[in-house]
Amino acid sequence: MRSDEATSDGLGRLSLLASALSGRALQVAPGEPGEPAWTDGTLVFVDAATSARDRLEALAVQASLLAAGSLEPEVVRRLTRRPASVKRYLAIEGHRALAANEHLLPLRVRSLIDWNVAARSDAPAASLAASLSLEVIAEPPENFGTIRARHLLASNDPGGNSAAKREHDVRQQPNRVLAELDEDESSAGGSVGSLFSSPVGGGGALGRLLRRMLEAVRQLNGGGPPGADAPTHWTRRGTRGSYAAFSTGLAGTLEEAALEGRGRKYPEWDAHRQRYRWDWCTVREVEPSSKSCTPLMVSDAFGLRRSLARLGTGLDSCHRQVQGDDIDIDAAVEARVDVKAGSAPDDAVYLDSLRRRRDLAVLLLLDISGSVAESAATGQTVHEHQRAAATALTVALHDLGDRVALYAFHSQGRSAVHLVPVKRFDDDLDLLVMRRLHGLVPGAYSRLGAAIRHGAAILEEQGGTSRRLLVVLSDGLAYDHGYEPMYGAADARRALVEARRHGIGCLCLGIGASTDAEVLRRVFGSAAHAAIPRPEQLRQVIGPLFRSALRSAEVRRR
Amino acid sequence: MSTTRSSRPYYVPIGSEEHVFKAAFRQGMSVVLKGPTGCGKTRFVEAMAYDLDRPLITVACHDDLTTADLVGRFLLRGGETEWVDGPLTRAVREGAICYLDEVVEARQDTTVVLHPLADHRRQLPIERLGLTLDAAPGFCLVVSYNPGYQSVLKDLKDSTRQRMVAIEFGFPPAEVEEKIVAYETGIDQNRAAELVRLGQAIRRLETARLREVASTRVLIATGRLIAEGLSPREAARAAVAGPLTDDPTVTSGLVEMINVYLAEQPT
């Protein structure tokens, strides 16, 4: 066994394995020394001090439990009430889960499975029933770890920020094993057992209240049974439910700014009545504040230049090329004449269509509503991811000689849709732009439709090229006062169609946000869109996305 | 190009794909093969070409592929212009199977030339020669693509797709894949089973961190390195972890998985 593996870094490297075995995003973190392994559904805690083999086995068991549905809230909730049966449940269900996952397990873990025990159950419910019965059940091997029911339930909870909660869990109750829980303390009703823990974690009384409130919202949204999905999905719903918490950021600034300047009016599509509300939204451009930092301006940060270089160029038919699709008859005749006249002919007698002329104007719209302040799965906030992507795209396109503009947007009601010009088309790409970009603070809401309409208008007036592209960087949560998600999605979709009708290609990128594909499809409709977990992956999607967006606009232009 | 009738390329059918293909071939219909990279599409076409005793002409499509590249062009030779057939034209004249790999990569204006060939007309108009070629009997157009990113690459135009018969490919089930890996590489069954298990675990990560998952091709490459005497872990690091990702954290995660799934030394 290598000693360096005992570090937390060594454990982190097992995350990929854990994800593979559990079939969901699962991280591995060091647990308290001497504690049995356990999981909260997004993290597996294993004792870093044990041998590699023990760790592997513990990990395999916990991941298999997750994969086999053994830790679904319905089952776990029943376990909270009967702490004594946790071990018995684990003894049966652990083997069953391993057996169910057998085809994926590394060979050396397979010896862990007791097929006789596994055969006693065919589902979590059956294992649970057996564990609650009087049957004789052998103790589970030590490497099976334990099940911490409350942590599992807390992390399935739709409310709250998962990163904060995770931290909270670890800090507050590192040693609390389910078996120690008192019956009445863990019962679902208004318990006062853990009033002292932070409300964010969902463990305290306040947290429970919050959870119950948010659950109602989730049902309104038509979600499936609790815990039916990976926790990432719930985070999103949680955000949905708790917009109120995000409105503090820029409220003051917005109101102040709203007093100055007249703004521009745009219509909005009323999905309920199937018609436009004319002059409904007022969009103002708000001068950005810049932050006095010196952010790095890395050129070609994510290797985008190569994918983008081929796009947005006009095909020029070039005469007298050394190679090409067709023969340039004039040149060929001249060459022939040269030969006849006895002088050396020029071989460049072909016609080729080359992409040479840059002919592209791109306007990036960056969502800075409160919801992007949520942290993404990778630890940074969605805003940071989107900002990184916006920077990379702006720099890459600018380097290629395209016309680029970058506007950020958020809103506070229909009369205060604000676009922050970080870089206008005619601005130079300099440090000031970067400072402005880093000075953006997410806050308030997103009236996506109005922002898209304004972006399209700017593109049309100032773009100045025949190919125009609108890139929306957003988590896809369209929400504002009187702009609830379904209505907002319909309006945003409409706005994108309008833009396309004017020959502007649209593409939408979600980076790091946990919005699921269905919601994105609802908001972005037929516009090219993609959701990627990290900005580094931009390179892989940007080529096809840009191409598809440009093509849709081209069809319109013809 | 023209396969000598040595032996049939090794392909293990998983469902009815061979029957579907042969039926479509006899009816003169075009075929689209959908599936992830490295799952055996090309090998399938090779096996079919062998079974049907047709030459196979393969074109790897890319985004600068022009119509002229497919159909042909005039070249200058000694002061005269001379027409040279492209691969597609050659296939149409000879009655060969023309396989366009990764067809969505080609520019849309290029794929338009396939339309009259793909439907009942089976004709190839060659504008520059003022000719319309009727496809020789035995000509079959086969295209493949990787559905990949769901919303991004739904690119194959509907008008193109509807002219074709679709066959879907996935990775073979574990037992079959073990057989394939063992056959292709000559390593023993247990070793192949280990590799396949690793591959299947990595495939579960599909959406999470990797662009492409460990394909059968990657597993075979690993097996071939093992057959050359490399230790399984070394081989897998070189043939699995390296090609799949450039990201150091993901790489270290993959290496960890490799260490867990594969034994240290050749047995």
Image (cartoon, rainbow, N blue to C red):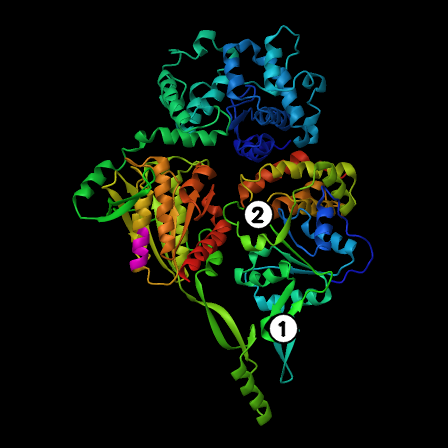
Q: Is residue A381 above or below residue A120?
A: below
Residue extending furthest toward the right:
B6
B252 and A162: which is toward the camera: A162
How many callouts does the rendering have? 2
In the image, the segment drawn in magenta is A455-461
Q: Which element is circle 1 on?
A: strand
Q: Earlier in the sequence, mark 2 or mark 1?
A: 1
Residues packed near mark 2 inside 10 Å, few (<14), some (14 to 19) or many (20 plus): some
- Using the image, tell me which numbered label, if any, was put on residue A368: none
Residues packed near mark 1 inside 10 Å, few (<14), some (14 to 19) or many (20 plus): few
Q: Is residue A25 left or right of residue B3?
A: left
Marked residue chain, label 2:
B
Estimate the x, y position of residue B85 in percent, counting from the top left: 66, 71
Residue under label 2:
B147
Marked residue chain, label 1:
B
Quadrant in which the N terminus of chain B appears: bottom right
Tell me, yes or no, if residue A427 can be seen here: no
Q: Is residue A294 above or below residue B89?
A: above
Estimate the x, y position of residue A396 in percent, counting from the top left: 42, 56
Q: Is residue B171 above or below residue A17?
A: below
Estimate the x, y position of residue A475 in percent, counting from the top left: 40, 40
Q: Is residue A138 left or right of residue A72?
A: right
